[in-house]
Image (spheres, rainbow, N blue to C red):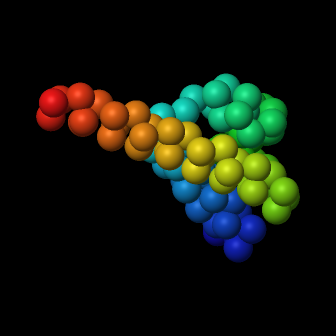
Amino acid sequence: MPAVAYARASIARDLIRARRGAGLSQRQLAESSGVRQETISRLESGKHSASPRTVDRLTTAIDAARKSRKRKGVIRDRRRRV
C-alpha cells in the first residue's frame, strides 16, 4: 500500500473512531465543525486528504462533544448518588 493511501486509511479509522466515541453522526459533526458532511464522508472512506485547517475544525468539534457528554455523565452520576 503506498504511503499516501496508508496515511489516508489510518486517518479515516481514527476519525471514525473519534466521531463515534463523541457520539456524533457525520451530519452532527458537519454542523458543529462547519465542514461539509460530504467532506467528512470522503475523509472517512479514505478518498480525500484533509487540510490542517479541516483537521483542526474536526478535532475542535469532536473535543467539544466529548466534553459535553462527560459533563452530562457527571450530572447524571450526581443525581443517582443523591
Query: Which residue is nearer to you in this view: 4 or 21?
Result: 21
Going 67% across and 66% down the picture, which residue do you hit? 7
The answer to whether 1 is drawn above or below residue 54 in the figure is below
Furthest residue toward left: 81
Query: Which residue is nearer to you in this view: 35 or 63?
Result: 63
The answer to whether 79 is drawn above or below residue 68 in the figure is above
Going 58% across and 50% down the picture, which residue do you hit? 63
x, y (%) of residue 13?
Answer: 55, 53
Furthest residue toward bottom: 3
Could you tell me how many numbered marks the image carries? Answer: 0
In-image side of 59 versus 13 (left or right): right
Residue 31: name its quadrant. top right
Image quarter in which the C terminus is found: top left
x, y (%) of residue 72?
Answer: 40, 34
Please indicate, yes or no, whether residue 20 appears anywhere in the rendered image: no
Going 67% across and 26% down the picture, which residue do you hit? 27
